[in-house]
Amino acid sequence: MAATVGNKICILPQRNIIFNMRVLVIGGSGQTGRLVIDEALQRGHKVTALIRDPSTLLAKEGLTIVKGTPLEPSDIESAFNAVQGDIPNAVTVTLASPQVKGTRVMTIAHENLIAAMERHGVSKIATLSSFGVGSSFPNITVLMRFAISRTSFRHLFEDHNQVDETLKKSGVKFVLFRAARLTGAKKAPVQFIGDDGKGLGIFAGLGGISRASVAACLVDAAEKNTWDRSTPVITN
């Protein structure tokens, strides 16, 4: 995978790549989740998607669709056991939290997923987070800092921050991609800015990152150990 460092594009090391995986996709009916499914299938992996309404996804070769929600442990268990003898090797999460006070959608989903992963001996989870979560908060734009602090955005980010803490306290190999503003552009080279996103300047993250690029990063994280137990800020 190509990455940009400064003005240079470099190829990241391809370490411990896992081929022919089964990936459990959480959030597969959303814009980014659909791209994760397509990316994984194009690379020759099998996919299990846990979604509320299976009619929202078209049937595809290599795709197993399970009806349910990650907020219910029994539904997650059904997804892990959907294909007999073929437990998922990794999990990707592209859920969105509602901007509602006290929301814990992302946190509860991850608590349930971690418990299931530990039962089944699955160690890798890659999650779409946001630039502005955790240590990256001081390095986003002033406008975004205001929005997160003073508007309903804060409820969403509180949930994301709790996910950050939950995964770091767990024993799983997690990757939390703190993505800049999501766009509908094509897949492009990705800049990995480190956990805090320092160095992007006063317009930090406004250029954004395409959902297609994020999908590729999530599948890369499932395949490799390059970013294990880290929270890189990513942008195009």
Image (cartoon, helix red, strand yellow):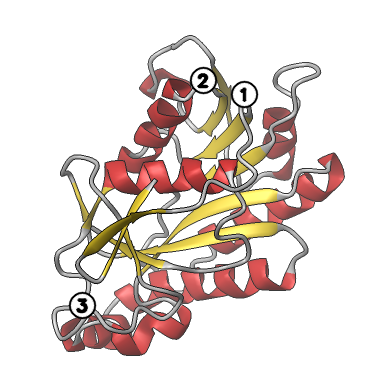
Mark with earlier residue (3, 1): 1
- CA gap between label 3 and label 1 equals 37 Å
Position of residue 209 measured from the top left corner of the image (x, y, whole percent):
24, 56
Q: Quadrant of residue 74?
A: top right
Check contact, mark 1 vs mark 2: CB within 8 A.
Answer: yes
3 vs 1, front mark: 1
Q: Which residue is mark 1?
A: 20
Q: How many marks?
A: 3
Looking at the image, which residue is at 69% across and 36% down? 89
Check contact, mark 3 vs mark 2: CB within 8 A.
Answer: no
- The local secondary structure at tag 3 comes to loop
Q: Quadrant of residue 18?
A: top right
Q: Is residue 159 above or below residue 110?
A: below
Q: Which residue is mark 2?
A: 44
Looking at the image, which residue is at 33% across and 56% down? 10
**Mark 1 neighbour class, 10 Å CA radius: few under 14, some 14 to 19, many 20 or more:** few
Mark with earlier residue (1, 2): 1
Q: Quadrant of residue 236?
A: bottom left
**Mark 3 neighbour class, 10 Å CA radius: few under 14, some 14 to 19, many 20 or more:** many
Can I make out residue 102 in this image?
no
Q: Is residue 13 left or right of residue 228?
A: left
**Mark 2 neighbour class, 10 Å CA radius: few under 14, some 14 to 19, many 20 or more:** few
Q: Which residue is mark 3?
A: 204
Position of residue 196 measured from the top left corner of the image (x, y, whole percent):
41, 81
